[in-house]
Amino acid sequence: KHFSVLFIQPRTKEPPKIKDAKGWPGYCNNLPTEKVRKLWLDNYSDHGIGLLTGLEVKPGFRIAAVDVDDDKLVRAVRALLGNCPSAKHGKKGMTFFVLSEAILKG
């Protein structure tokens, strides 16, 4: 399965406020078309990329992020989550990428 990413404004966690990014939640489980990917590469190659969470990576499970914005809490959260092989350090704190059971609506 492919992971879906979106361009983000430099030094932020936000997509640009332009029509190309409108409706970006729709890309969580659907990759953008080749035309849209080319447009993004042509116009935003100097931007960062962000992983869209919510992607179902196996039946009933989605990618989620636990964002810890306080360095003092990272150790405690790491102990609660157990082994998280995928994480990133931020300016402060850490973000852990985890599998989360999908919540069924109904």
Image (tube, helix red, strand yellow):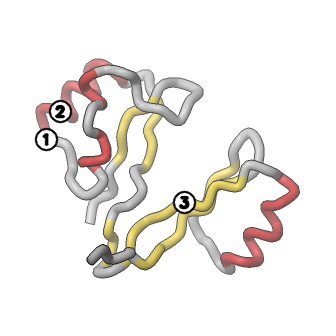
Residue where numbered disc 1 is placed: 33
* In-front residue for pair 81/2: 81
Q: CA distance from mark 3 to mark 2?
A: 26 Å
Name the front one of labels 3 and 2.
3
Mark 3 is on which residue type?
A: Ala
Q: Amino acid at mark 2?
A: Val
Could you tell me residue 84's position as x and y percent?
Answer: 62, 72
Camera-side residue: 26 or 44? 26
Mark 2–mark 1 contact, CB under 8 Å? yes
Circle 3 residue: 65
* Figure label count: 3
Q: Residue under label 2, please give it.
A: 36
Label 1: few (<14), some or many (≥20) within 10 Å? few
Query: Which image quarter: residue 75?
Result: bottom right
Type of the residue with mark 1: Thr
Label 2 element class: helix
| 28 relative position to 80: left or right | left
Q: Which residue is drawn at the image coordinates 77% and 44% (left, top)?
A: 92
Say which of marks 3 and 1 sits in front.
3
Give the alpha-carbon distance from disc 3 to disc 1, as whole Å. 25 Å
